[in-house]
């Protein structure tokens, strides 16, 4: 994956150290080394470890909006599921996003951690690239979200038919608080490689 840093805490570029793990199952367990990123000059090029601590649910897990609608500017989420789906202003691009809470450190977590928030987003347009029923399907909320009672009114998405979607994910990560910890706070962005997204209920997977 590629990293773009706003400070000297992290190395901008793509190195063998810059890695991210798949997440299998929801809610995920604490995942040690969910990400590793090459440190910059301020950290003496030490590896920065990011442990995944949780993935918050939108709207407290209650869900929101109408995921049966592909209308411009529509935004919705499914109850007990971490993704938010949003159409752009002319309904030609649909984005999928989720938030993750991370603890960052160099060396070991026993030396202290810095809490980070990460927002992961992918944008889809035109015809979907992927496998099965998703390959060649229109990129819209109805095809990339999930059936869930009254919020999704009876339609079946290509994902529920066993398809997957391949696309690039981007993430922006920034510190939310500082304890006696390393690294010192810095903001950076990630760009992962091709990702297979299988948005099955209670399960999602990211493959870099």
Image: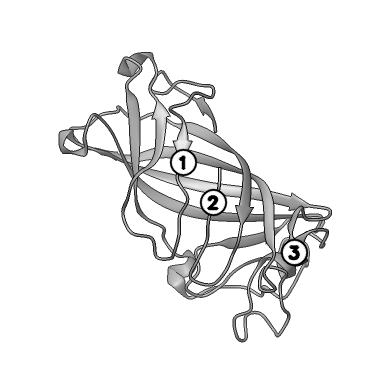
Q: In the picture, residue 193 is in which quadrant?
A: top right
Q: In the picture, residue 164 is in which quadrant?
A: bottom right
Badge 3: few (under 14), some or many (20 or more) residues near its Cα, within 10 Å? some
> Tag 2's secondary structure?
loop
Q: Earlier in the sequence, mark 3 or mark 1?
A: 1
**Residue under the point 45% across and 20% down:** 11
In this view of the protein, which residue sits in the foreground, 130 or 174? 130
Residue 103, position in %: x, y?
31, 43
Q: Earlier in the sequence, mark 2 or mark 3?
A: 3
Mark 1 and mark 3 in contact (Cβ < 8 Å)? no
Mark 2 and mark 1 in contact (Cβ < 8 Å)? yes
Q: Is residue 140 visible?
A: no
- Between circles 2 and 3, the one closer to the viewer is 3
- Between circles 3 and 1, the one closer to the viewer is 3
> Tag 1's secondary structure?
strand
**Residue under the point 53% across and 35% down:** 190
Disc number placed over residue 206 in the picture, else none: 2
Disc number placed over residue 132 in the picture, else none: 3
Q: Which residue is mark 1?
A: 20
Q: As displayed, is residue 31 above or below residue 27?
A: above
Q: As displayed, is residue 3 above or below residue 83?
A: above
Q: Is residue 93 left or right of residue 10?
A: right
């Amino acid at each position: 994956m590629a990293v773009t840093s706003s400070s000297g805490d992290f190395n901008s570029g793509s190195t063998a150290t810059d890695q991210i793990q798949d997440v299998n199952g929801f809610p995920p367990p604490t995942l040690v080394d969910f990400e590793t990123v090459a440190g910059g000059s301020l950290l003496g090029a030490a590896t920065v470890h990011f442990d995944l601590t949780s993935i918050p649910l939108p709207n407290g897990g209650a869900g929101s909006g109408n995921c049966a609608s592909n209308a411009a500017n529509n935004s919705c989420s499914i109850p007990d599921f971490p993704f938010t789906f949003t159409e752009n202003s002319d309904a030609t691009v649909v984005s999928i996003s989720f938030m993750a809470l991370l603890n960052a450190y160099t060396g070991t977590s026993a030396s202290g951690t810095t809490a980070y928030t990460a927002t992961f987003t992918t944008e889809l347009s035109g015809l979907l690239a992927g496998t099965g029923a998703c390959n060649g399907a229109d990129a819209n909320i109805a095809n990339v979200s999930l059936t869930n009672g009254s919020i999704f009114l009876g339609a079946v998405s290509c994902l529920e038919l066993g398809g997957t979607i391949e696309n690039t994910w981007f993430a922006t990560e920034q510190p939310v608080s500082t304890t006696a910890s390393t690294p010192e706070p810095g903001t950076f962005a990630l760009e992962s490689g091709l990702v297979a997204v299988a948005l099955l209920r209670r399960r999602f997977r990211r493959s870099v």
